[in-house]
Image (cartoon, rainbow, N blue to C red):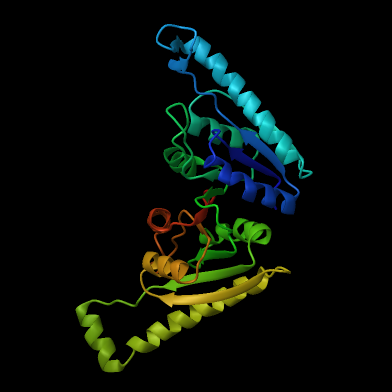
Amino acid sequence: MFNKILVPLDGSELAERALKPALKIAQHSEAEILLLRVPLPETMLVAAPHLYGGYDLIYPSQALNKSRQEAKDYLDHIQQLSAQAGLNVRVKAPEGDIAEVIVETALDEHVDLIVTSSHGYSGITRWVLGSVAEKVLADAPCPVLVIRSAEPLNKVLITLDGSELAESALKPGIETAMALADEVTLLRVAEEVRFDEMAQLEIAERGLGGRLQEELYKEAETYLQTVAEANLRDGLTMQTLVRIGAPTGQILDFAEAHNVGLIAMATHGRTGLRRWVYGSVTEKILRGFRGSMLVTRPKPMT
């Protein structure tokens, strides 16, 4: 259950794409919404028709005050709109490096979920939120939902590899799906069995290759069924699927073929020789998938 949701904004319509799903999740979870905007002080030219040339130069101290007021006015406006839905909404406008402020705020406020847009900028004085989002993903102390489209997120794909670390994506993934989606698919990719040349000859002679692959498939199938039964929710359709092959390609192929709007996965989850190297898989999915992503960075195991 999410208790506090952080939504970083920069004043652009693209960044505000994160608001609608964040509010839906907050309504479902009865969570508090924390709206964040970081003032960006800098020297800038502004229109000044009364002056010769039509422009005036605002220096850093003036720009900072202007940026602070803009941030306050903007957040107050969004807060009023969001509060109309009956939600508990707070605003903060701390100063500093944008990505660092987001992560520090999430830590200080004990945030359970960060909801952000992958791109949100308008003009030189706004965030380039794509790069900010990547930094936040690397250091966030909680799951990060990256919204990349205004399209509804009706179908959610949760990827697993059989490890406890990968399963850290389950709870936030299902909680998010309960608020935003109708259907969840639990996907596990079993990689093809590969052997060196000598082993291949021996296995072929004994006819074991197909049997070993079949055993891996059944193991993966049983695992997913067990996970699904333990995570069933009323009003949410849940299905399981096992695929054979390279994880990145299989995940992306399934997502595209079935119009998946959101993929939920952990940043790493390797245990044993036949598990995915989750850090690299997640990075490839982030760069190859055009839909939204929910990324969970598991806490270090003690």
Q: Is residue 181 left or right of residue 134?
A: right
Q: Is residue 214 left or right of residue 85?
A: left
Residue 132, relative to residue 174: is it above or below? Answer: above
Between 209 and 37, the one nearer to me in the picture: 37
Q: Residue sitting at 34 percent across and 89 percent down?
A: 208
Image location of residue 273, percent across then percent down: 38, 67
User: How many labels were placed on the picture?
Assistant: 0
Residue 114 seen anywhere in this rendered image of the structure: no
User: Farthest right residue?
Assistant: 86
Q: Quadrant of residue 94?
A: top right
Between 82 and 157, the one nearer to me in the picture: 82
Q: Residue sitting at 43 percent across and 12 percent down?
A: 54
User: Farthest left residue?
Assistant: 197
Between 208 and 81, the one nearer to me in the picture: 81
Residue 69, relative to residue 213: is it above or below? Answer: above
Residue 284 seen anywhere in this rendered image of the structure: yes
Q: Quadrant of residue 282?
A: bottom left
Q: Is residue 4 left or right of residue 98?
A: right
Image location of residue 62, percent across then percent down: 52, 11
Image location of residue 120, percent across then percent down: 49, 39
Q: Residue sitting at 56 percent across and 70 percent down?
A: 185
Image location of residue 172, percent across then percent down: 61, 56
Q: Quadrant of residue 202?
A: bottom left
Residue 122, relative to residue 215: is it above or below? Answer: above
